Image: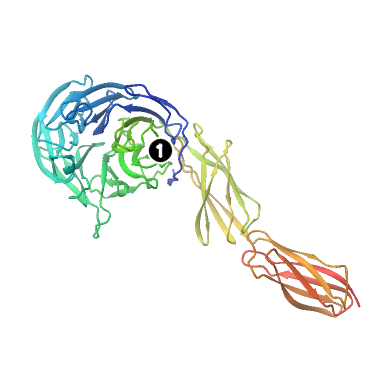
């Protein structure tokens, strides 16, 4: 398989989705996504968002609302994998972070002065552990038999990014302070193939202008900190602004939704760069990131206005630049953008759960997205050809070929991209649509004489792997010119000869100030006359006073230029006295 690049091409929406459940509506799928990726949408009965967690064993999605029941209360709603609401329970104080036990039997919910355990099937409380008072919303995470949570005391939400946040733990029902803390709020992440690793990211704020990332080994009785990293340079530029953290399925990589940069992909051990995903669409600010449990995909969420995509689903390996499936949420039935930390996958990678909100942040939608289960091969078949047989500068040339796609046909016509390489460098060309029979024609207008190599690519789509690139070299010649003359059959020596004509050229227009040479041949010999200028429309006039009688031949010539061949034409006039 070759290496591919992202094209930024949006795939067409073809699938409508029906949602049933509490507060659910019958809605259409988002304005921009692949037909092979279905999207079920449920309007959630919440007015704020704290956290979301997915229980793949029991096929449940839990979403916490910090103020959904009473002034100091909260709500947790549960949906199944079909987008139907299956339960609700209320908390006595603000519901914030959520986390699942390793066996998925217990859902932990962060509250103001407790971490409360609930049975994931009955939704009944099964226990609670007292904790230091938190007024800003806890982050929760589980590694093995230990649970971790943050604590940020504050008199009001205004102080949440200014006060200190502590990392606390609960082991065997006992609460403890780890001694690790940071200014402002803290993000926590676990999962993937790193069962005893806890990742921590400092949120950007007035007291954290250069936030850090770090990780902890939690296999022992106390957490042991590993490598840490800050991102600002000596001038203070490039600082991290993390909105979400995700661990890859194999535990080797860490992805950060960085509002200042986009999506950062790091090695989970030393936090060095591990690759680069293509930039988010212009105008989109990164808000969420999640790896699928099967290791195949990464989902990247964003805050974006209008028709700019808010969600991209693509291969997790950045070296595989298969075209991303893009979703643009821009209506009252879908939400307007993906919320911070609003992406989670099922463990098998069969479903992505995306949470969107409106412009005011007081209404929320749960999207259940099913990426295609398989990708199929593609290939260019047969040799490339070009027309016309002789390409010339400034005239269209068509590069023709055929693309074969295994599996289902794409929802929209596939597109072939191309670049032209000459001695002057490489230039990208407009993509060409592939017809139903697989044929396509890439059009170009060469701008230089010499060899031009055209390299064609199919970057793949959500159901097709990219094809191996193919190339063809075309010899580009100068564009031809021609001269047409209009001359009298007979003239006199006393009256003179007037010949009119027109110089025409293919390709680019001739430069201004072109002149033509004129030679006269009579019975006394051959000689040159004064050159004649060519008007902007290509016309010219030759005037001469013949020196001899009988046949006189006038030859008008254009010597050509860097882009055009030379040409000539002759006319014979019978001259009398």
Locate residue 83: give its quadrant.
Answer: top left
Foreground: 492 or 372?
A: 492
Circle 1 crowding by C-alpha within 10 Å: few under 14, some 14–19, many from 20: many
Residue 169 percent across, percent down from the top left: 12, 36
Residue 455 seen anywhere in this rendered image of the structure:
yes
- Whether residue 115 sits left or right of residue 61 in the image: it is left
Locate residue 538: give its quadrant.
Answer: bottom right
Q: Is residue 281 above or below residue 577?
A: above
Foreground: 64 or 383?
A: 64
Point out the image quarter for the N terminus: top left
- Whether residue 449 sits left or right of residue 491 in the image: it is left
Foreground: 73 or 342?
A: 73
Residue 10 percent across, percent down from the top left: 45, 40
Q: Is residue 305 above or below residue 348?
A: below
Residue 77 percent across, percent down from the top left: 26, 25
Q: How many marks?
A: 1
Residue that lies at the very extreme toward the right in this rendered image: 577
Q: Which residue is mark 1?
A: 328
Q: Secondary structure at mark 1?
A: loop
Point out the image quarter for the C terminus: bottom right
Q: Is residue 130 above or below residue 165?
A: above
Foreground: 337 or 417?
A: 337
Q: Is residue 495 above or below residue 327?
A: below
């Amino acid at each position: 398989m070759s290496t591919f690049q992202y094209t930024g091409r949006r795939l067409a929406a073809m699938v409508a989705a029906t949602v049933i459940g509490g507060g659910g509506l019958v809605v259409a799928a988002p304005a921009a996504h692949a037909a092979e990726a279905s999207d079920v949408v449920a309007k959630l009965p919440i007015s704020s968002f704290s956290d979301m967690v997915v229980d793949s064993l029991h096929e449940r999605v839990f979403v916490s609302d910090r103020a959904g029941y009473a002034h100091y209360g909260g709500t947790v709603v549960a949906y199944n994998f079909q987008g139907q609401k299956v339960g609700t329970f209320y908390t006595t104080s603000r519901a914030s972070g959520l986390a699942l036990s390793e066996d998925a039997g217990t859902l932990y919910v962060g509250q103001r002065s407790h971490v409360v355990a609930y049975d994931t099937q009955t939704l009944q409380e099964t226990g609670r552990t007292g904790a230091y008072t938190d007024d800003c919303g806890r982050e929760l995470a589980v590694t093995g038999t230990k649970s971790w949570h943050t604590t940020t005391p504050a008199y009001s939400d205004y102080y949440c990014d200014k006060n200190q946040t502590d990392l606390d733990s609960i082991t065997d029902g006992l609460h403890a302070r780890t001694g690790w803390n940071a200014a402002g709020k803290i993000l926590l992440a676990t999962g993937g193939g790193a069962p005893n690793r806890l990742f921590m990211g400092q949120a950007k704020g007035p007291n954290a202008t250069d936030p850090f990332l770090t990780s902890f080994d939690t296999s022992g009785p106390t957490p042991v900190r590993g490598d840490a990293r800050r991102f600002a340079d000596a001038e203070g530029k490039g600082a991290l602004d993390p909105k979400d953290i995700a661990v890859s399925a194999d535990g080797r990589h860490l992805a950060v939704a960085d509002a200042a940069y986009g999506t950062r992909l790091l090695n989970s051990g030393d936090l060095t760069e591990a690759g680069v995903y293509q930039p988010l669409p212009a105008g989109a600010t990164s808000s969420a990131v999640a790896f699928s449990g099967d290791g195949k995909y990464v989902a990247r969420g964003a805050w974006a206005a209008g028709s700019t995509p808010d969600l991209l689903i693509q291969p997790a390996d950045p070296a595989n630049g298969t075209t991303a499936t893009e979703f643009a949420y821009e209506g009252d039935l879908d939400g307007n953008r993906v919320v911070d930390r609003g992406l989670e996958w099922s463990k098998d990678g069969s479903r992505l759960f995306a949470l969107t909100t409106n412009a005011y942040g007081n209404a929320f939608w749960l999207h259940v997205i099913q990426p295609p289960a398989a990708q199929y091969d593609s290939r260019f078949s047969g040799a490339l050809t070009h027309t016309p047989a002789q390409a010339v500068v400034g005239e269209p040339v068509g590069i023709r070929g055929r693309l074969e796609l295994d599996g289902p046909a794409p929802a929209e016509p596939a597109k072939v991209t191309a670049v032209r390489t000459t001695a002057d460098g490489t230039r990208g060309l407009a993509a060409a649509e592939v017809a139903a029979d697989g044929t396509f024609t890439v059009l170009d207008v060469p701008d230089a004489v010499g060899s031009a190599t055209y390299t064609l690519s199919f970057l793949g789509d959500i159901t097709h792997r990219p094809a191996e690139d193919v190339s063809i070299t075309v010899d580009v010649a100068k564009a031809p010119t021609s001269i047409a003359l209009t001359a009298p059959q007979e003239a006199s020596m006393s009256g003179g000869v007037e010949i009119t004509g027109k110089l025409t050229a293919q390709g680019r227009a001739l430069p201004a100030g072109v002149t033509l040479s004129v030679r006269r041949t009579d019975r006394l010999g051959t000689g040159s006359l004064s050159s004649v200028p060519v008007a902007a429309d290509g016309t010219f006039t030759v005037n001469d006073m013949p020196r001899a009688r009988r046949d006189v031949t006038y030859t008008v010539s254009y010597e050509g230029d860097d882009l055009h061949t030379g040409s000539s034409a002759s006319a014979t006039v019978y001259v009398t006295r």
